[in-house]
Image: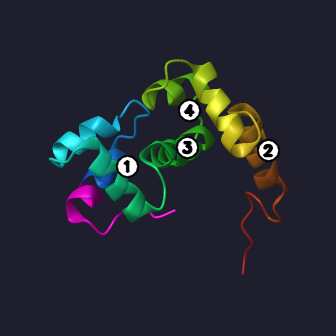
Amino acid sequence: MRLFPQDPELAGLCRDFLAQPSIRSLPVEWAKQLHRSQRTFNRLFRQHTGMSFGVWRQQTCLMAAVPRLLSGSSVTRTALELGYDSPGAFSSMFRKALGQSPTAFVRAATRQEEELPNHGSQTEA
């Protein structure tokens, strides 16, 4: 997955999106900002990222969700911050993409962290 296209204007929109990801962002809005037709925009986006806008948007929102969840943000808060209509819609996307619910993902990550050698302790020299 290439997050940043070579096209400077398109790369700028991608950077702006990464700063405030929202699943509600529409390709027609991006096309208008670039003064392109939606069809031309779709072709340009796929050419520069290797995927459709919809797939890129979902993957980017997923990448934004993981650190939020791992830092203790609730599923509901994370879902709403990313523009999902409901925690259920967000959880469904998360499960399809990562094979487990957001809550199970956080539990597994926390368990793995706790199992790491010397977790939470510092050795003295």
Horizontal relation, residue 86 to residue 57: left or right = right
Residue 15, picture quadrant? bottom left
Q: Nearer the viewer, mark 1 or mark 4?
A: 1
Secondary structure of residue under mark 4: loop
Alpha carbons under labels 4 and 3: distance apart:
14 Å
Most foreground residue, 36 or 74: 36
- Distance from Cα at disc 1 to Cα at disc 4: 18 Å
Q: CA distance from mark 1 to mark 3?
A: 11 Å
Which dot, 3 or 2, sits closer to the camera? 3
Type of amino acid at the residue the image marks with label 2: Ala
Q: Earlier in the sequence, mark 2 or mark 4?
A: 4
Instruction: Classify residue 92 as left or right of residue 52.
Output: right
Q: Which mark is residue 62?
A: 3
Q: CA distance from mark 2 to mark 4?
A: 16 Å
- Residue ID for mark 4: 73
Q: Residue 3, can we see it?
A: no
> Mark 1 = which residue?
18
Q: How far separated are the C-alphas under marks 3 and 2?
A: 17 Å
The span shown in magenta is 1-12
Lower position in the chain sequence, tag 1 or tag 2: 1
5 in the magenta segment: yes
User: Is tag 1's residue or tag 4's residue first in the polypeptide sequence?
Assistant: 1
Q: Contact, CB < 8 Å: mark 1 with mark 3? A: no
Mark 2 vs 4: CB contact within 8 A: no
Residue placed at 85% from the left, 56% from the top? 115
Q: Residue 121 versus residue 102: which sits nearer the camera?
A: 102
Question: If you read the primary sequence from the N terminus, does the residue marked by circle 3 or circle 2 appear first?
Answer: 3
Which residue has dot 2 on it?
Answer: 108
Circle 3 SS class = helix
Kind of residue at badge 1? Leu
